[in-house]
Amino acid sequence: MLCCKRFPIIACLLLLAFWCYSTFAVAATIKIGEINPLTGRLAKQGSEIHQGVAVAVAEVNDRGGLNGRQVELISRDDQSQPDVAISRAEELCGWKKVMALTGGYNDSLVGPISEVAKKYEVPYVASASLQKQLTQRENPYFFRVANLHGFVQPLCGILSESLRPQRLALLHTATPGSTEFARDLRSCLQSRGIAVMLMEKFRPGTPDFTPLIAKLASMNMDVIVSGGFFADHLLLVRQLKENRVSPKAYIGPFGIAYESFIREMGENAEYLYSTFAWNPGITNPDTEAASKDFVERFRSMFHREPNTTNMHGYTSTRAVLAAMQNVLHQKKPLTGPNIRQSLAELDLVLPMERVAFDKHGDPHHYQHLVVQIQKGKFEVVYPPERSTASAIYPMPRWSQRK
Amino acid sequence: MWTTVLVSGITLGSFYTLVALGFALIFGVTHTFNLAHGELLVLAGYVAYWLWKTYGISLLFTFPAAILATLVVCLILQRLFSRLREPMEMNSIVLSFGLAILLQNGMLFFFSGDYRLIRVPTFNQGLHFNTLYLSYGQLTLLALSLLVIGLLYLLMRHTFLGKALRATIQDREAAALAGINVGGMGVLAFAIGAILIGLAGPLYGCVHYLYPTAGLQATLLAITITIFAGVGRIRTLILGGWILGFAESGAVVLLGASWRELVSAVMLITLLALRPQGIFEREQ
């Protein structure tokens, strides 16, 4: 009977204890949010970004956190849909009160998240975003570790300095990033005296490239640059072979420089050109040890080799965490405006790039390397100072291969 | 160039028809609007991919396993759909949409979001006919699609079961009054649909590529061709597939690759406005 009378008091005390524990436990951690497409059409890339983010957070926590406070990562799936991305960003910024945001793949998802981040004054460092418009919107809370310039310059360089094609076709997908890439590359090439004979747009996931290949063959194109993605290259290259169309070079800046691409394509991947910003064996000068640490930690967490997309997630998160660390070192309160200011002043050398942002939030030093697949491996062929092998040009015709 | 475009259009159109056949048959017989059709196709592709990649089984021998897998899933679906009440079309859309999401996430869990490709080395070789080059991949696609479509045509036209199926497509109530087991025809339609999906899935993994959400595109394709041709008409279904395939290929050459989808969308909208019963269907 006595027990029954005391039950409400005991229950209240238990609830109070639980509330105190959860409140103080949460207060001890620093919350950052990440929003990635973990399901839907961009699930592969989103999951890879997420893995890179998770490695960066685990690394910082293993080193004792930020000024002794552990970092709590709150991950959300935007399902590859912009409206879902907005609601997840609202949840993280408005309700979960995260200190900063990271992650993000594809401008159609990163753009809406950046607007919500601005509304709540939460700094957002996007992992993979290219569209120029996003950094021209005067959003002081938006930063990114990638941009189009990093792709266009090395490709324009190799095409104008080494390959010098007579008949170049430039294909791109109907996405903002790929379209801008094609326009920028064309204007850069034209300024260096290389004419683009054909520029064609296609929808990502096109089921058949045969008519387009017939058109390319009829125009006798010697170099094809395709701004398609991983899956588009799988189909386009295979159908080039099926139709016995052998360009002197096939360049796919997005989606070819992955071990999984070589695995799926097999020998048909040989001699294709692509670009990457980082690879387990190829890292920013003087960051070999940091790169090795990342690779080992990644392997232990995910039991496979990391790739350049993983590294983009890692880099953006390391930038966020470094900016927070600097704020804490300066004994300032950890607020959105202070983290934003710290990000604007950041200068951090990481395996993928030296992270420093311009006044629009674009990276100063993001630069891709042009690689060619040779004997199943990625060999850097441009710029010359970082090359690991000579470019094989023209690539052997399909009929000359085994 | 135009012969290549024509061959490409016919090959692609035949494969489109194979993809659409199962959907059209199930819809015609049971009035079930199966939005998970594409996901079933991708599932069959994944089964073939798994057998090919893990055990090195050649493409030809992956078909029975793919058919078995889709047969099991389709018969479960049939049980679920048979519990729905009128309006069947609307309720089946809601149910199959949920199932499509479930299947997508299941495939994401088991096969990850990576793009998968079944590589058949002989598909890259081919035959020359003067200026025309036909790869074995195209030939296989064309031959298998036409064979399956032909067999289904014979079944529908020259067997009692086929006639019963056609009667059910034309008028369920009249068919039931004539003594046809309409419920049984529903099970049969799902079973034949599963076989067709099980055949198309591995081919899809060879000529296209597999990823968990690839099914949406196949479903839209199936819906387009079914509307294009009219429900339950196999001959017109293949003509619809060819017209669509050729229109898409021609648009790429004449107007540019970005016009491809627009041309098929315009054709579909025009058709819905002018001939909602299907391009070859006679008005009743």
Image (cartoon, rainbow, N blue to C red):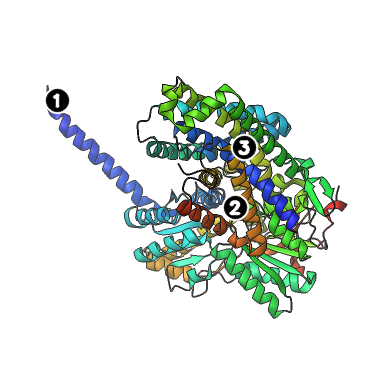
Q: Label 1: few (<14), some or many (≥20) within 10 Å?
A: few
Residue A226: quarter of image: bottom right
Identity of the residue drawn at 63% across and 29% down: B154
Residue B116 shows up from this direction:
no
Q: Do labels 1 and 3 touch, CB within 8 Å?
A: no
Identity of the residue drawn at 50% across and 26% down: B75
Q: Mark 3 lies on which chain?
A: B
**Disc 1 residue type (three-letter):** Cys
Residue A196: quarter of image: bottom right
Q: Can you give x and y, in whole percent of width and height, for residue B88 in the image?
A: 39, 35
Q: What element carries label 3?
A: helix
Q: Which mark is residue B201?
A: 3
Q: Label 3: few (<14), some or many (≥20) within 10 Å?
A: many
Q: Which mark is residue A205?
A: 2
Label 1 to label 3: alpha-carbon separation: 64 Å
Name the foreground residue: A119 vs B59. B59
Residue B175 vs A385, above or below: the answer is above
Q: Do labels 2 and 1 share a chain?
A: yes
Q: Can you give x and y, in whole percent of width and height, for residue B254 in the image?
A: 66, 64
Q: Is mark 2 on a helix, strand or loop?
A: loop
